[in-house]
Image (cartoon, grey):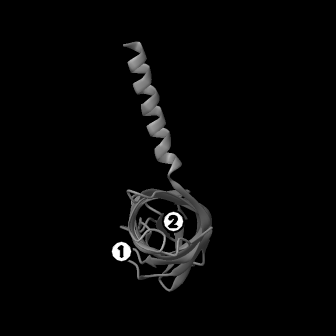
Amino acid sequence: MKKIVRLLFIVACLFGMAMPAGAQIGFGVKGGLNLSRAPKTETSANGKVGFFIGPMAELTVPIIGLGVDGALLYSQKGGKIEGESAVQQGIEVPINLKYSIGLGSIASVFVAAGPDFYFNLKSDSKLKTIKADYNAAELGINIGAGVKALGHFQLGVNYTIPVSSAKLLEAATGAKIPGSSYKNRVGQVSIAYLF
């Protein structure tokens, strides 16, 4: 009986090791545009176009099309409030569970979702009448889709649903502006090249 249990354990371990061995790992570079939506505040606000760029990694199990991707991106986003510019610069770490369907490495379509972590490095606020108090970190949920072609190129769109607030606006006098705590709502268009 002990030999059968050992044999089953060894077979289970070998089967478990065989699955990741068939996984495809890719490393590459990802970049694109951040399209910020304006916050819903009592002040007049508009979104701003920023950019992001950085290394990425992708792990895919070919037969079932399931995978994970992640990136370490320098990201810039912001907006215009009362006609004055506010830009946020930081490190963004999106980690997505991805499902692909298609013709293998020739072409495939994917959908992805997962958490998005943003760490604020620098906030350039050219606001004279309003003070923007930025949080050190933000959390969001990514939802995205795209296409992958020739095993190397990837084009995608993504929307980050904010979970935590980005900043709180205050008048120059120090008074909090009612309803001014806002969240970064960011759409992204990206292109990536995997080696």
* Spot occupied by residue 139 in the image (x, y as percentages of width and height): 45, 57
* Spot occupied by residue 69 in the image (x, y as percentages of width and height): 50, 59
One can see residue 123 in this view:
no
The residue at 41%/82% (across/down) is 44
Residue that carries the numbered disc 1 in the rendered image: 40
Mark 2 or mark 1: which comes first in sequence? 1
The vertical placement of 63 against 38, above or below, is: above
**Amino acid type, label 1:** Lys
Q: CA distance from mark 2 to mark 1?
A: 20 Å
The residue at 55%/81% (across/down) is 85
Residue 78 relative to residue 145: left or right: right
Quadrant occupied by the C terminus: bottom right
Residue that carries the numbered disc 2 in the rendered image: 174
Q: Nearer the viewer, residue 14 or 31?
A: 14
* Spot occupied by residue 104 in the image (x, y as percentages of width and height): 44, 68
Mark 1 lies on a secondary structure that is loop
Q: Nearer the viewer, residue 53 or 104?
A: 104
**Amino acid type, label 2:** Gly
Residue neighbourhood size for the residue with mark 1, other residues' Cα within 10 Å, grouped as few (<14), some (14–19), many (≥20)? some
One can see residue 15 in this view:
yes
Residue 180 relative to residue 49: left or right: left
